[in-house]
Amino acid sequence: MYLRDNPVLQYEFISNLRKRRALALLFFYPALLSAIVLLAWPEAERIDTTNPEASKRLVTMFFLGQFFLAGLLTPTFAAGAIAGERERQTLELLVATPLRPSAIVLGKLLASLGHLVLLAIASLPIVMLCLPLGGVSFYEVLAAYFALLVATVVFGLIAIAASSFFHRTMASLAVSYLFIGPLVAVGAWLWTATERSGALRLYGTSVLLPVVGAVFCIIFVELAIRKLMYPEALGSEGRTVVDETQELRHAVGLVIQRGHFPDRLFAPAKRDDLLPDGANPVFDKEIRSEVFAQGTLMLRVVIQISMLLALPMMFFCLYLAPHLAPWYVSYVLMFNVLVGPLFSAGAITSEREQQTLELLLTTTLSPWQILWAKLLAGLRVSSALTALLLWPLLLACVLVQPYWNNLASMAIYVAVVLLSCVTTATVALGCSVVSKKTSVSLMTSYVVVALLFVGAPAALVFVATFFPNAHVDRWTAASAAISPISAVFHVPLHIETTAYYANAPAGWAWLFATHLVLNGSMLFGMLWLFRNRWRVLR
């Protein structure tokens, strides 16, 4: 019932492998890794095996790239394991079957991770090509893949546990990334820190990692099983019955109260009067809707975890070492990358899924009225959540004396963050216009935003590592003109002890023009699609 005759495992695994994204990933993933190895391969006719540093760097980058991809892809396959049953209105049927909760969790886990394991196996022959370069043993490669397998299982269980607690796949996905992101950062730091000590790395991956992974697995499996064993009160069609008054009364930590300031700025109360004349009904409906499904658990978790992670970074980067302020701003930008698409990726696809898009398009509202209402409704939540992490930067300008001479740079940091909020919301809305399902729109949004924010810095590191004779200054300026994360590191910040990044190219100045053109082009394209509504409805 757990493996051989598990209907959940058989159905989920076969359906996942038959999806188009499975075929696309199996093709493009090894192709991308092969291209990276080909570009980084030594150009000399004879390979000097006595200098294996290039091989070590290549294998390290190869493994870390797969590790980051595992952290990015695993929640996309597993975050909808239980939440998807709620959305498809089949949760009651699943709970009523003779299957044990542990069999359901195991089936969901194996079905979600099966495709990722196939991707890892497909990449193994490529990494084996690096062994003849020297510097890396066969056992180190096995240790790396074993660590990758354990990490993937832990990430999958985190996503499934989040999926059992939240009512929507988007909420489960966001909370999964909040838990997985710090684990990915710590794992990458530990792997690079033990690069010079092969014995310590082998001991950590073969002894310590299984123990830590087993503890995480037991915790999250128990959480998921308990949630399935004792589900909440299920109403019609598998929807959880939630009393908001009772939830606020018994909630622990930060709570959201729609009628109080500043909560009503991004989560106003339901309207109990008539809509004023001339008002945009789409904007009023979107801004007052419950974007977090029933209850506010997801919003509270996002705020509290993000603030908990921000406290040590804020203390160290803004107060102890003021010249490291760009690193804290980068954390704020990465948080916006996570939450920005979450509130805009379903703006249009949800209308399709609810079969209300045709009715919306037949109203007297213009396409521009519909689009700006959808854009502002999603932007107001993501920007408000990002602002919760941005205020420590403004506080540091008052309390930390070295920042008094860098107020212009601080203003540029704030402007870059605000521009990034607009960009992430616009990209997610554009993906929602061209997609048919919210899950597809959300994943496409994350891919596009990740390439836009992280792609250029990653390419810069690759060029600087394997092409030392290239014109790095041109690459850094281009990276800062595309990626906000690169741009904040190229803002002149003069501290008494050092002039940090004072001589860096002013590529950040082009960031505003680049993103304004990008956002304007996307809005123009969305307006064109709406005016040609038969293309949208097809």
Image (tube, rainbow, N blue to C red):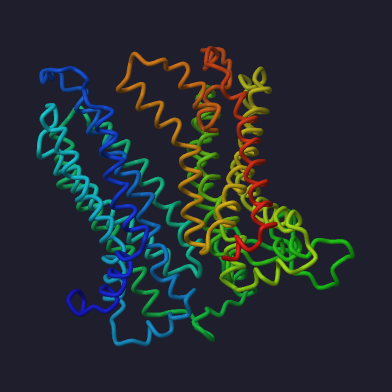
Does residue 508 appear left or right of residue 456 in this picture?
A: right
What is the x, y in percent for residue 28?
32, 47
What is the x, y in percent for residue 492?
58, 18
Q: Is residue 153 above or below residue 361?
A: above
Q: Between 428 and 330, which is closer to the camera in this rendering?
A: 428
- The residue that appears at 88% across and 61% down in the rendered structure is 278
Does residue 17 appear left or right of residue 231 in this picture?
A: left
- The residue that appears at 47% across and 76% down in the rendered structure is 88
Q: Quadrant of residue 107?
A: bottom left
Q: Is residue 305 above or below residue 110?
A: above
Does residue 136 appear left or right of residue 156 in this picture?
A: left
- The residue that appears at 15% across and 18% down in the rendered structure is 45
Q: Is residue 78 above or below residue 450?
A: below
Q: Quadrant of the C terminus?
A: bottom right
Q: Quadrant of the N terminus?
A: bottom left
What is the x, y in percent for residue 237?
51, 84
Residue at the far right in the pictured view: 277
- The residue that appears at 27% across and 79% down in the rendered structure is 7
What is the x, y in percent for residue 204?
19, 42
Q: Is residue 488 visible?
A: no
Q: Is residue 26 visible?
A: yes
Count of numbered circles on the image = 0
Q: Between 512 and 320, which is closer to the camera in this rendering?
A: 512
